[in-house]
Each structure stands twice: as C-alpha cells, then as structure tokens.
Image (cartoon, rainbow, N blue to C red):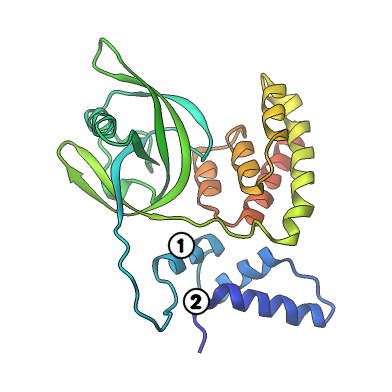
Amino acid sequence: MRDYRDAKAMAQTLRQALKERSVSFTHSESLELIAKVFGFADWNVLSARTQADPSPTGGILQHIPALRMPAMPLRDLVLFPQMTTPIYAARVKSVDAIEQAMNGNKQIFFVTQLRIADDDPKPADLHQFGVIGNLLQVLKMPDGGIKLMVQGLRRARATRFDADGSCLVAELSPVQEEGAAEAEVAELLPEVLRRFEAYANVTLSSPPQALIYLSGLREPGRVADAIAQYLSVSIEQRQDLLQTVNVVLRLRRIMTFLDAKRQAA
C-alpha cells in the first residue's frame, strides 16, 4: 500500500491518468496536489519529510555517518549555493564557529534565524534549511569582529544543533535537487531569463554583470539560485526559495516574484 513516501510515483500516476482524460496537469502541479492529499502544506514540506523518512528498501541499510560542522546564524541574509558575499560577524558564537572552521576544512553551515532581533538564537530559533559555505577570506577587526568573504556551496538540512564550546554545531543531511530533468524546465527557463532581464534592466544597479553571469550557466537549479539572490524580496521569501528543492516549483515562484515587481512598477 502506498504512503506519503511514494508521493513522486503517485504524482506521475495522477498526471498520466489525467492526460488520458485530456486534462492538462504539470508535474509540479501534480506534486502539490499529492502533498495536499496527504495533509502537508505544500510539496516542499512533503519532500523534506520523505528525505527524513525514506521508503524501506527491503535490504540492509548501511549506516552513513552524519555530517557535522560549525553553524553560524544569519540575521538578515539567506545564503544561496554559488552566491559569494561579504559577512560581518561579531557575536561570540559566530566568531567561535569561524575559528573552528579555520582549524578544519574552512566550511560553515550558514542558516538564517527566524527573528532578526534575536541576539542569541537557540536551535529552535533557526530554520532547518541552510547552505554549507566556504570561507574565502577572513579578516579580524580591531573591535574583535571578523569580516568574511564566503561562497555558498550546497544546500543542507540540519537534523539537530548541539552546543560545542561557545558555538553551535549542526548535524546535517544532504538535500537532493529534484525536477531538473523535467520537460517543463525547458519551457520555463527561457521565460524566466527573459523576465529577469527586463527586471534587471529596470531594478538592478549593475544589471549587465548579473546577466553576463547567468548567460554562462546551464543547470536550471543554478540559474534559479543565481536569480534568487538578486530579487528584491523579503527574508522569508528568500528562505522559501532556498527550501524549494524542486527546480520547477522554484522557477515558477521566481516568475511570480518577477511578475509582482513588474506590475508594481
């Protein structure tokens, strides 16, 4: 008997059944509908649940050691994969996380906190989805703070946070991107790029740089993440895009933001 862990197969079955009855339904719409059927808010939530509780394989499951690394909460920034940005760290836990990372592989799990005003966020005050980032430059300041240049590498989901000395350490599970090979992506990508070009020429202070960078990308997920960092949207909306592991849904949500900005202009 199928359960929520078979959601992808069920979405495909639903789409095929509707197609035979001349009802047009995209794969992403099918996924969203199946998520609603199982009582989840959307496919993003269901996808995270299935990753945390995969379908039984009937074989012997191999133990995969959890990835652990220092975690650094971000107040008003959502880091995306492939995004390079400066960050200033002054909080004791953040400084300690940087020092631990520099003594190791120079990687930190960057995760956005739920409320900007929290000076000392606890594990319950942090999002689960974040990005593993690489420390490119580290400059200690006279006031005790640290200036960083960081590059986002890949998405990860924190299954727990532990205190290790004066900083947080995250236990992470990988996040697999979905839907990049769907036929719908080939239709969406050119339209998203076209709308972003119009948005960039009106909104961004230096649109040519963004457009030149995007023209060299081929993977749909990377294109979506590259556009996401330039959007004038809220922290909550950025976090939603980060947590949207299905590329088709991410591209559609980006189009929604671009349309909203165009209508407001």
Instruction: In the rendered view, tell whether residue 42 sits above or below residue 143.
Output: below
Estimate the x, y position of residue 100 in percent, counting from the top left.
24, 34
In the rendered view, tell whether residue 21 sits above or below residue 116. below
92 relative position to 151: left or right: left
Q: Residues within 10 Å of mark 2 (few under 14, many from 20)?
A: many
The one nearer the camera, 58 or 160, is: 58
Tell me the residue at 66%/45% (across/down).
Answer: 254
Residue 48, position in %: x, y?
A: 46, 62
Residue plotted at (29% across, 13% down): 141
Question: Label 1 near label 2: C-beta < 8 Å?
Answer: no
Q: Amino acid at mark 2?
A: Tyr
Q: Is residue 229 left or right of residue 19?
A: left
Nearest the eye: 102 or 182: 102
Residue under pointer 2: 4
Instruction: Look at the image and tell me in which quarter the C terminus lies.
Output: top right
Q: Is residue 19 above or below residue 183?
A: below
Q: Which residue is painted at 73% across and 66% down in the image?
A: 26
Q: Residue furthest top?
A: 142
Q: Give the residue furthest to the right.
A: 22
First along the sequence among labels 2 and 1: 2
Q: Is residue 157 left or right of residue 254?
A: left
Residue at 43% of width from left, 80% of height from top?
Answer: 57
Residue assigned mark 1: 48
Q: In terms of image quadrants, where is residue 195?
A: top right
Q: Helix, strand, or loop for circle 2?
A: helix
Asked whether residue 78 is in view, the answer is: no
Residue 8's spot in the image, x, y percent? 59, 72
Q: Crowding at label 1, few (<14), some or many (≥20) Cα neighbours within 10 Å?
A: some
- Tag 1: amino acid: Ala
Determine the CA span between mark 2 and mark 1: 11 Å
- State whether residue 34 appears in this view: yes
